[in-house]
Amino acid sequence: MLNHPTLDQMQALGLTGMVAAWRDMTAQDHAGDLTREEWLGLMLDREIAVRADKRLVNRLKIARLRFADACIENIDFAAHRGLDRRNIFSLAQGAWLKAHENVIITGQTGTGKTWLGCAFGQQAARLDHSVLYLRMPRLFEDLALARLDGRFPRLVDKLARVDLLILDDWGTHGLTDQQRLDLLEIFEERYRRKSTLITAQLPVAAWHDMIGEPTIADAILDRIIHNAHRITLEGDSMRRQKSPQNLTENQNSEIS
């Protein structure tokens, strides 16, 4: 049986899970039936679980997912969008992340691209991968400001190190010469080292023209497409399928 000074020491060491487990077990009638090894095992299990939960909370906070509640188990397969359930759950296992492959999600506005991308982001965080979500306009703003105040190398290093980089709204506008070079540098640093998930209204076949300069377009797409899993969402906007009276209760629905 642990005394209070020992509990205080465990608390000071940050072993909050073990302390909570001890308090829970002492409140149970059968606590005296447990051996010392069983007590220690249960306390360690709780500590491991608490630390895993804290890591997940921190990873999701850093990820800044647009839809923080999006998750694989809440994907709407009933909607007619051409989603392959087997393929989605296969990707959810995370082998593509370990292999440093990419995912490309395309489809018309409102078909659920962003929501699905965020669901894969949360799944990656659950699998203990670092995640960062960025809309393309915000990415280019951050890169331009970083170039002005001297943070550019650090920002590129940050983007290169994250296990899963989610780039939303790809291809909504043409690129400047500097933006092309910035993207090439980012994808060069990430190629076969980390994974990238891209969502776009623009079909992949039109990306070369969108990037603009043929040589750089070839280099960028070569680092994105050839090791990418593709998901093409079909059908009409899910936003139009939601009736106005359901807006409040469905505010976290999969509609982006």
Image: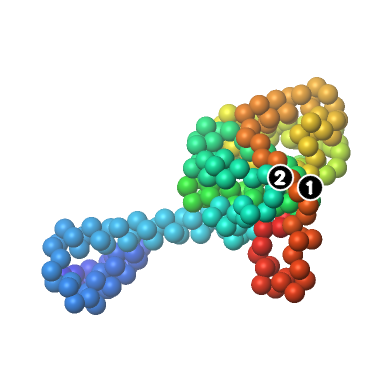
Quick one: quadrant of the C terminus? bottom right
- Residue 213: x, y in percent? 85, 27
The quadrant holding residue 189 is top right
Q: Quadrant of residue 76?
A: bottom right
Left or right relative to 202: residue 160: left
Q: Which mark is residue 233?
A: 2
Residue receiving disc 1: 108
Give the structural element (helix, strand or loop) at label 1: loop
Amino acid type, mark 2: Leu
Percent across and percent down for residue 203 are 78, 37
Task: Name which residue lies at 73% across and 28% down.
Answer: 221
- Is the residue under label 2 in contact with that under label 1 (CB below 8 Å)? yes
- Which residue does the image show at 46% across and 55% down from the upper left? 55
Relative vertical location of residue 95 with respect to residue 76 in this rendering, above or below? above
Q: Residues within 10 Å of mark 2 (few under 14, many from 20)?
A: many
38 to the left or right of 120: left
Q: Nearer the viewer, residue 33 or 76?
A: 76
Residue 155 visible? The answer is no
Q: Is residue 179 visible?
A: yes
Image quadrant containing the N terminus: bottom left
The image shows residue 33, relative to residue 130, as above or below, that is below
Q: Residue at x 47, y 47 (%)?
A: 128
Q: Is residue 64 above or below residue 214?
A: below
Q: Residue at x 73, y 42 (%)?
A: 106
Q: CA distance from mark 1 to mark 2?
A: 7 Å
Frontmost residue, 55 versus 119? 119
Which color scheme did the rendering employ for the protein? rainbow
Crowd band around label 1 with a 10 angstrom C-alpha radius: few (<14), some (14–19), many (20+): some
Amino acid type, mark 1: Gln
Q: Position of residue 78 (x, y in %)?
A: 63, 54
